[in-house]
Amino acid sequence: MWGAAALLGAITLASVDATTPEECWPLVAPSASDLDWLRMSDGKKEVWRLADPLREDSIWRPSMLHQHNDDPAPQSTPGPEFETLYPILTKLYEFDESSDGNGDPYHTATSVIVRLLPMQCTHSTILYFLSFLGHMDLEYKKLLHQKDPKAMLLLAWWYAKMLGYSTWWMHRRAVLECKAICIYLQRLYMQQTDIGRLLDYPKMVCGLAVSSEYARYIDQANSQSIA
């Protein structure tokens, strides 16, 4: 059961009919199939509960133990872009790492993104990145369906981080939908300074033009690192 659910989840993520960002959510007209891959993620949680792949006699147990140990997440040096964008991110979402969120629909998603910032997505860290899907609050998912700009911005950042590790089941969706979200938000919310500035990171990663201020900052940071 769990093997079938995992394969179906991967196939759902990999199945993208669009060939351009303009053909992707959130740029296309609303459809009942919008964000179907999120509903598949919910189904996988139920199969996990029923199959219990971590039980003692499970064939999956040896390969999954490292996902559930108490070792801290591997860390690496953040890129220079985070020095300027991290304070804006925490300000926009009023994020306090010591808080439990008190019903804030953005809190869990923001806390996962913040933990992922200093990490690179690789074969050994991919499960940490997939925790963004596994810990999505119901209210946050509702906001995504409503095309809430702050909810979509967090998803764009997650896609951008995922692009560091090319996988057959995620890479195409991540590129197209990251671009689509950036284009959508840029058209409607660029006048909101914080959202506009925070778009620069996913725009840079997925190959869209960034603001001149951000481009200068990255050029300066790269020059200093080379020196």
Image (cartoon, grey):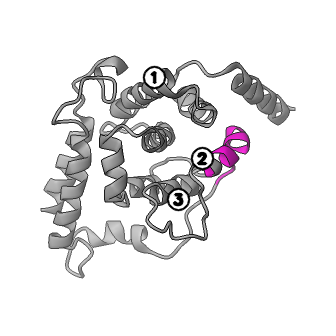
Disc 2 versus disc 3: distance between alpha carbons? 13 Å
Q: Which mark is residue 183?
A: 1
Q: Position of residue 59 (x, y in %)?
A: 21, 70
Q: Residue furthest front?
A: 191
Q: Is residue 201 at all visible to an observer of this figure?
A: yes
Q: CA distance from mark 1 to mark 2?
A: 20 Å
- Magenta residues, dominant SS class: helix
Q: In the rendered image, which residue does mark 3 sit on?
A: 111
Which residue in the rendered view is the most extreme toward the right? 227
Disc number lying in front (1 or 2): 2
Q: Residues within 10 Å of mark 3 (few under 14, many from 20)?
A: some
Horizontal side of residue 191 vs 139, given as left or right: right
Q: Quadrant of residue 13?
A: top left
Of the pair 40 and 136, the residue shown nearer to us: 136
Residue 92, numbered circle: 2
Q: Quadrant of residue 11?
A: top left
